[in-house]
Image (cartoon, grey):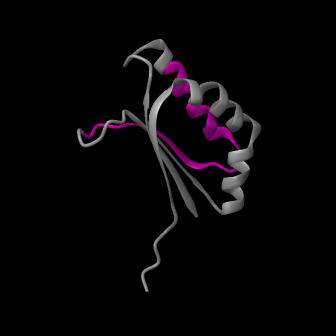
Amino acid sequence: MIRHTVAFKLKHPSGSMMETSFLQAACALASLPTVRNFECLRQVSSKNRFDFGLSMEFASQQDYEAYNTHPEHVRFVETRWKVEVEDFLEIDYVPFAAA
């Protein structure tokens, strides 16, 4: 299992229609075939500069790669993410197996 997460800050004013439009487009990624447990989150900690987060899980590396190369994901990244995101931090996790 892979948990793909990204914390991000948008270029848009908080509460704006542009912000809402972006978040709705991001949430549409939940419908892609290999995505599991998708969440779109508002970040509330004062310990970092990000405003939102996305979290999703994939059953395997193959499922994760299928997501990354899916035409809808590629289109979102090219037409929305690269244009509207000011800053981000991406972290992908796999379960830790203690010895």
Against 11, residue 43 (above or below) is below
Q: How many marks?
A: 0
Residue drawn at 62 percent across, 32 percent down: 28
Against 5, residue 29 (above or below) is above
Residue 70 is situated, as x and y percent measured from the top left of the image, at 74, 42
Inspect the magenta stretch and tell me whether residue 44 lies in it. yes
Judged left or right of residue 3, residue 33 is right
Residue drawn at 45 percent across, 39 percent down: 88
Inspect the magenta stretch and tell me whether residue 65 lies in it. no
Specify the segment rendered in magenta: 20-45
Q: Is residue 33 visible?
A: no
Judged left or right of residue 42, residue 79 is right
Residue drawn at 57 percent across, 30 percent down: 81
Q: Quadrant of the C terminus?
A: bottom left
Against 21, residue 59 (above or below) is below
Residue 25 is situated, as x and y percent measured from the top left of the image, at 59, 27
Judged left or right of residue 46, residue 95 is right
Residue drawn at 29 percent across, 41 percent down: 48
